Image (tube, coloured by chain):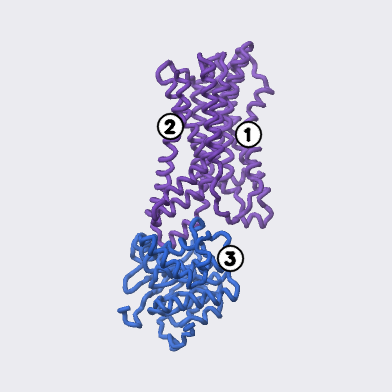
């Protein structure tokens, strides 16, 4: 990576957004650095998903700006934002909505296939990630009949296979039991660390949030943490060398 | 009452579908009443009256098929966890769907009766009243029981069929992946048998092998049975052929578009395959009829035209409804694909590919069946 280590990957400036009248985000500003794991911690309904959707360019906030790698995201056309999501971002939701018609490896390889990668290369990359996440055994099965943990790991493989610059994880472990939760998070964050991928992790769980380099608290659509990323604990407190 | 109240707040497209069911039901009701009128004016000609009545079976079947498809798609009667929690489970919702089907059917029947009476000249005050006085037996009084029985036929059949088709649906349960549909051998056998029956009947009856309602005194039973067998055979073979089309799309290292298009087609084969087979059968019948009566004097009366239009419209609408439902069921997967950054263009291209491959496989099949069916009849 040629960027200086403290360059901002994602920057949001005073985001305001509302869902048909009810405010979801109020003056939210934040910055993330390359390779950083940023947790957005808050209860259900505090606006975490909306924030992640705005940051990843799925939604354009009513007011405010989103910048990625020094370029504005909020002014891009829907097509360019799609391309950005396809090529630079990864996403894991609370319930892995895998494409039911495709097998596990095809689901994992889908971002590469959508980018026009050759099938053989896409398959090799997907299989590598499935192996790392320990589900290469069901690579040829459909999502139907897989456990939640297996599906969520497939979704993780799908999010990581394109080596994204930013990984958005929206309550990725909310539907999992404790053992599966720890395993998934650890693998996810270790993998992201090895690729220097920035992770924006939304969670309501303090234990999960504790795994991050830095935590921002979101309450009723307002951020209550330090928005500028000058947190003293910073990267040093990273306990993710597993 | 709940059916009415839900209908009031429904989406215009849903209402349009129900209106189409009402229109189809009205059309069939009108055809049945016309058959009754013919029987009233020709009391001695039992065979011809029966022939006219039996021809109504095809539009009736197409209308019931369509009504069931619409009841299946109706969003207001789709099982929902929220409604299930307040006690409106799948059972009650099936009853609700049946009730709204009955409502559409009854509306159509009432309109058919009004239109019929209007054309007979019993109701006056509008243009064209009594325009078909002789044709519709204006002199003879209309037998009440027969009229009611005929008019109740469509709503009753459609309601029972919808209730039977919808019972036991479950809310938001994940569907198992589709196994390859196994109807192809049966479909081939039935289609071939149908063509064979048609050929034998045509050879046996030299004069008028396929008498349309206007030609009296002949038995279309053989040809009709052959056609029905062919239609059932194509309906059986439809899912398997659609599945095969999906396979076809994925040969030779598919990229994202072909992979998605093929898999989705395979997954939807059980849903759109059957209506597609039926449309195929109807199209081949239309082509056959066209080929037969293209040169000579056409025995198409307005009622035959109405019946044919009903069958074509209903089967096409059933197919479109099935496609719409399949699309609705894929909404979450589509949303996820969009989240991954799949462009609208990619998804549209996949849909276009699906349509193209279906056309490529089913169009020659339709043409072949039509040609084979027309061969013995045109001699």
Location of residue A58 by image quarter: bottom left
Location of residue A183 by image quarter: bottom right
Supply the letter of whichever chain is blue: A
CA separation in Å, label 3 and label 1: 45 Å
Q: Relative to B53, does residue A57 appear above or below in the rendering?
A: below
- What SS does tag 2 mark? helix
Contact (Cβ within 8 Å) of mark 1 with mark 2: no
Task: Kindly identify which chain the residue marked by label 2 belongs to.
Answer: B
- What SS does tag 1 mark? helix
Pointer 1 or 2: first along the chain: 1
Residue behind mark 3: A147
Q: Relative to B95, does residue B214 appear above or below in the rendering?
A: above
Q: Which residue is at the front of the view, A114 or A62? A: A114
Q: Position of residue A37 (x, y in %)?
A: 45, 79
| Residue A133 appears in the rendering | yes
Q: Which residue is at the front of the view, B201 or A234? A: B201
Q: Position of residue B316 (x, y in %)?
A: 49, 37
State the mark number for residue A9.
none
Q: Position of residue B225 (x, y in %)?
A: 57, 26
Q: Residues within 10 Å of mark 3 (few under 14, many from 20)?
A: few
Q: Residues within 10 Å of mark 2 (few under 14, many from 20)?
A: some
Q: What residue is shown at x 46% (from left), y 64% (from top)? A: A108
Labels 3, 1: one chain? no
Q: What residue is shown at x 49% (from left), y 21% (from top)? A: B302
Quarter of the rendering occupied by the N terminus of chain B = top right
Residue behind mark 2: B367
Residue behind mark 1: B155
The residue at the far top in this view is B44
Which one is closest to the eye, mark 1 or mark 2?
2
Q: Relative to B165, does residue B217 appear above or below in the rendering?
A: above
């Amino acid at each position: 990576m040629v960027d200086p280590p403290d360059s901002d990957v994602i920057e949001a400036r005073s985001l305001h957004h509302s869902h048909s009248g009810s405010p979801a985000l109020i003056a939210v500003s934040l910055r993330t650095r390359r390779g950083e794991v940023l947790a957005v911690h808050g209860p259900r309904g505090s606006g975490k998903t909306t924030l992640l959707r705005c940051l990843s360019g799925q939604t354009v906030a009513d007011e405010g700006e989103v910048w990625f790698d020094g370029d504005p995201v909020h002014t891009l056309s829907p097509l360019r934002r799609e391309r950005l999501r396809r090529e630079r971002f990864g996403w894991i939701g609370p319930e892995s909505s895998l494409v039911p018609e495709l097998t596990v490896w095809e689901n994992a390889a889908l971002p590469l296939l959508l980018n026009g990668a050759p099938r053989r290369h896409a398959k090799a990359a997907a299989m590598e990630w499935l192996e790392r996440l320990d589900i290469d055994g069901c690579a040829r099965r459909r999502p139907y009949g897989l456990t939640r943990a297996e599906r969520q790991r497939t979704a993780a493989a799908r999010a990581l296979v394109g080596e994204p610059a930013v990984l958005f994880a929206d309550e990725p472990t909310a539907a999992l039991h404790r053992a599966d939760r720890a395993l998934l998070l650890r693998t996810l964050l270790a993998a992201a660390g090895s690729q220097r991928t920035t992770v924006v992790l939304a969670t309501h769980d303090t234990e999960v949030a504790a795994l991050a380099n830095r935590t921002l608290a979101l309450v009723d659509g307002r951020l209550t943490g330090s928005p500028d990323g000058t947190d003293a604990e910073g990267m040093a407190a990273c306990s993710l060398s597993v | 009452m709940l059916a009415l109240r839900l209908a009031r707040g429904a989406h215009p497209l849903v209402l349009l579908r129900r209106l189409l069911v009402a229109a189809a039901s009205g059309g069939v009701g009108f055809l049945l009443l016309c058959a009754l009128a013919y029987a009233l004016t020709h009391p001695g000609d039992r065979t011809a009256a029966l022939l006219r009545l039996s021809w109504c079976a095809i539009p009736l079947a197409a209308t019931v098929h369509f009504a069931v498809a619409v009841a299946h798609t109706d969003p207001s009667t789709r099982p929902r966890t929220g409604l299930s929690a307040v006690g409106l489970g799948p059972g009650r919702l099936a009853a609700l769907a049946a009730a709204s089907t009955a409502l559409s059917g009854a509306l159509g029947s009432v309109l058919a009766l009004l239109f019929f009476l209007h054309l007979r000249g019993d109701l006056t005050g509008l243009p064209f009243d009594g325009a078909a006085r002789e044709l519709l037996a204006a002199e003879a009084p209309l037998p009440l029981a027969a009229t009611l029985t005929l008019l109740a036929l469509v709503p009753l059949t459609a309601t029972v069929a919808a209730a039977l088709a919808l019972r036991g649906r479950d809310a938001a349960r994940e569907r198992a992946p589709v196994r390859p549909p196994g109807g192809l051998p049966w479909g081939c056998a039935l289609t071939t048998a149908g063509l064979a029956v048609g050929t034998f009947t045509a050879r046996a009856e030299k004069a008028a092998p396929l008498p349309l309602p206007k030609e009296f005194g002949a038995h279309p039973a053989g040809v009709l049975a052959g056609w029905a067998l062919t239609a059932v055979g194509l309906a059986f073979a439809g899912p398997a052929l659609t599945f095969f089309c999906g396979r076809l799309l994925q040969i030779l290292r598919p990229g994202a578009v072909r992979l998605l298009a093929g898999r989705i087609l395979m997954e939807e084969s059980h849903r759109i395959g059957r209506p597609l087979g039926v449309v195929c059968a109807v199209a081949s019948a239309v082509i056959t009829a066209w080929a037969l009566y293209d040169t000579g004097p056409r025995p198409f009366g307005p009622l035959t035209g109405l019946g044919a239009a009903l069958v074509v419209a209903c089967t096409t609408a059933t197919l479109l409804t099935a496609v719409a439902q399949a699309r609705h069921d894929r909404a979450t997967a589509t949303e996820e694909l969009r989240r991954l950054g799949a462009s609208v263009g990619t998804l549209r291209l996949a849909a276009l590919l699906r349509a193209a491959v279906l056309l490529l496989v089913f169009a020659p099949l339709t043409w072949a069946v039509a040609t084979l069916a027309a061969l013995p009849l045109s001699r």
